[in-house]
Amino acid sequence: MKTAPFVIEKVLNAPVSRVWKAITNKDDMKQWYFDLAAFKPEVGFTFEFQGGKDDRSYRHLCKITEVVPEKKLTYSWSYDGYPGQSFVSFELRDDSGKTSVKLSHAGLDTFPKENPDFNPANFAEGWTYIIGQSLKTFVEK
């Protein structure tokens, strides 16, 4: 059964150009997201990072599938050694000098159900923190 994507939308007190740089510049990303060895906002660019919680870390494999400068960034998201593929999208919109950020994570239902780390509730908790706290704090400072 296909489940609806996880979606979170927040208005950040920063211009679109600043938020776009935060989600596409690896040095900025390191400060609020993950430490990426390389990142380029170009369709076809692949990147990876380690992430998880407690003592379980997963190698995330990602490939950029859509780039509309200062408007939309989408990439595939899968885990090394596990079935399933999902897609993460950041959509930015100017909101009177502030930025409306809509993040969607689709395809969470494709990951193994028997692994509690892949429970959609964990993604909801993670993205709520990342967008509502980590990214917000970084771009508004």
Image (tube, rainbow, N blue to C red):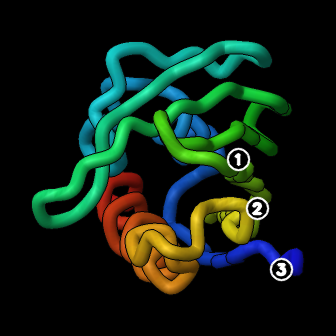
Residue drawn at (78%, 58%) of the image: 93
| Discs 2, 1 touching: Cβ within 8 Å | yes
Say which of 7 and 132 sits in front: 7
Residue under numbered circle 2: 107
- Crowd tier of the residue under label 2, counting other residues whose Cα lies within 10 Å: few below 14, some 14–19, many 20 or above: many
Q: CA distance from mark 3 to mark 1?
A: 14 Å
| Discs 3, 1 touching: Cβ within 8 Å | no
Residue under numbered circle 3: 4
**Tag 3, which secondary structure?**
loop
Sequence-first tag of 3 and 2: 3
Q: CA distance from mark 3 to mark 2?
A: 8 Å
Q: Given the image, on which type of amino acid does mark 2 rest?
A: Gly
Question: In the image, which is nearer the foreground, mark 3 or mark 1?
Answer: 1
Q: CA distance from mark 2 to mark 1?
A: 6 Å
Residue that sits furthest to the front in the current view: 114
Locate residue 46 relative to residue 75 in the image: left or right. left
Say which of 47 and 118 sits in front: 118
Residue drawn at (63%, 47%) of the image: 83
**Tag 1, which secondary structure?**
loop
